[in-house]
Amino acid sequence: MAVRAIRGAVQVDADEREQILEATAELVSEVMRRNGLETDDVISVLFTATPDLTSEFPALAARRTGFVDVPLMCATEIDVPHALPRVVRLMAHVVTDLPRSEVQHVYLRGAQALRLDIAQ
C-alpha cells in the first residue's frame, strides 16, 4: 500500500448552498468510485473553493456521504483575476495499491477545462 494524493474539481452554476453540496458530493463519489476506494482508505481531504463560493462548506457534503472519521479541511483559493469561477477543488490523501500512473484525478462539469491533460 502506498500513500497517494488524488486531485479533483467541479464547477457549480451559482453560489447556492444546495448546488455546492450536490456538486461536491458528486465529486467525492466519483473520486472514490474511479479509484476503487472505501472511506477507510482516505487519510484526509483538503477542499478549496473559489472566493465567489461562500454559501456552504464543501466538507459538509463529504460528511453527508460517510466521511465521518476522516479529517476534512476547507480553504479559499487565491483570487486570481483570470481563474475559472465557482469551482470546488479537492486533494484527497489515500492509501491504495494503485501505482501513481493509474490514479484517476476527477474533473467534472466546467472544471474539466482546468486539467485537460488528466481529466477523464
Image: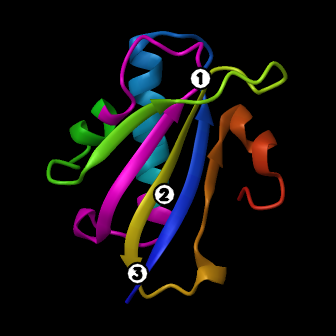
> Does the segment drawn in magenta span residue 90?
no
Q: Nearer the viewer, residue 68 or 82?
A: 82
Q: Which of the two labelled residues, at mark 3 and mark 2, occupies the earlier sequence position?
A: 2
Q: Secondary structure at mark 1?
A: loop
Residue hosting label 1: 12
Numbered disc in front, either 3 or 2: 3
Q: Is residue 10 left or right of residue 64?
A: right
What's the residue type where badge 1 is placed?
Val
x%, y% of residue 102? 62, 80
Which residue is pictured at 66% across the width and 82% down the height? 101
Task: Report the side of 11 relative to 36 (left or right).
Answer: right
The reply, left or right, for residue 35 in relation to residue 52 is: left
For the residues labelled 3 and 1, the Cα–Cα distance comes to: 29 Å
For the residues carrying marks 3 and 1, which lies nearer the camera in this image?
3
Q: Position of residue 74 (x, y in %)?
A: 39, 34
Residue at image location 45% in from the left, 40% down from the top = 47
Real-space Cα separation, disc 1 to disc 2, in angstroms: 17 Å
Within 10 Å of the Cα at label 1, are there few (<14), some (14-19), or many (20+) other Cα atoms? many
Q: Which residue is mark 3?
A: 96
Image quadrant holding the N terminus, namely bottom left
Q: Which residues are magenta?
A: 32-59
